[in-house]
Image: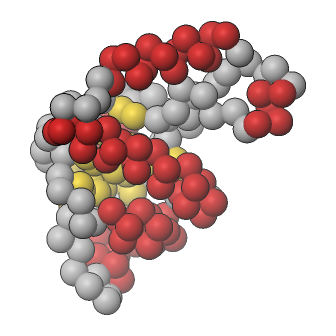
Amino acid sequence: MQLENQITVLGFLGNNPNQEALTALNLKELIYDKFQGFKKFQVVIIVSDGAEESTKLLRKELNQYKELKYWKFVFGSDEDINKIYNSLRAEKQLNPNLSSVEVFIIDKERNQRGRLDDREDNEKEKEIPTYGMYSYNCIEVAELKNKMSEDMRILFTEYRQKRKGDFNSTTRRAEDLKNNEQE
């Protein structure tokens, strides 16, 4: 599995991926279909060794209308899956079957991406302390359509600006942190 130099959506469907079809279908329809035309974009789904048959059924369902060229299934041991998942900033634990409805954005430098401040406007008005968002729930359609799509769009914009020499992410991130401290 190569994550370097790719913008990756990383998911975990465990030892029975076909049972997690809703997670995969929502991700396909709301994120993959929207961003598949971008260079260096991929979806990587980690499944358990031994789940090949269940993965074939899910792949057949996902490829029903069009082959998913940038969607990869990667097999791993339970130990490897736990190790990868535990290396991420995740608020929830993996399910006992090593699956999660949460997916993660990994940038080209293999850094996990998300939001430094996920508060809604009314929470900011009430001066609720800043909290981040580092994963996206694939069952929550609005979260995928609004937050994850926006965060992916921002990431692609950053890379496009970097190519043109118009972007300095260090400065932008420092400004974001400063603004969060002031609120």
**Left or right of 136: which side holds 41?**
left
Residue 137 placed where, x, y %?
55, 52
**Which residue is found at the position 61% from the left and 17% from the top?**
180
Whether residue 8 is situated above or below residue 165 in the rendered picture: below
Whether residue 169 is situated above or below residue 67 in the rendered picture: above
Nearest the eye: 135 or 147: 147
Whether residue 114 is situated above or below residue 47 in the rendered picture: above
**Which residue is found at the position 53% from the left and 57% from the top?**
144
Nearest the eye: 86 or 62: 62
Residue 84 appears anywhere in the view: yes
Residue 35 placed where, x, y %?
33, 62
Which picture quadrant has residue 50?
A: bottom left
Which picture quadrant has residue 58?
A: bottom left
Quarter of the picture holding the C terminus: top right
What is the number of callouts on the image? 0
Residue 60 appears anywhere in the view: no
**Left or right of 177: which side holds 128?**
right
Residue 87 placed where, x, y %?
35, 27
Whether residue 141 is situated above or below residue 176 in the rendered picture: below
In the image, farthest residue toward the right: 126
Nearest the eye: 67 or 46: 67
**Left or right of 124: which side holds 88?**
left
Colouring mode (rainbow / by chain / secondary structure / one colour): secondary structure
**Left or right of 157: which side holds 175?**
right
Residue 83 placed where, x, y %?
31, 31
**Which residue is found at the position 47% from the left and 55% from the top?**
149
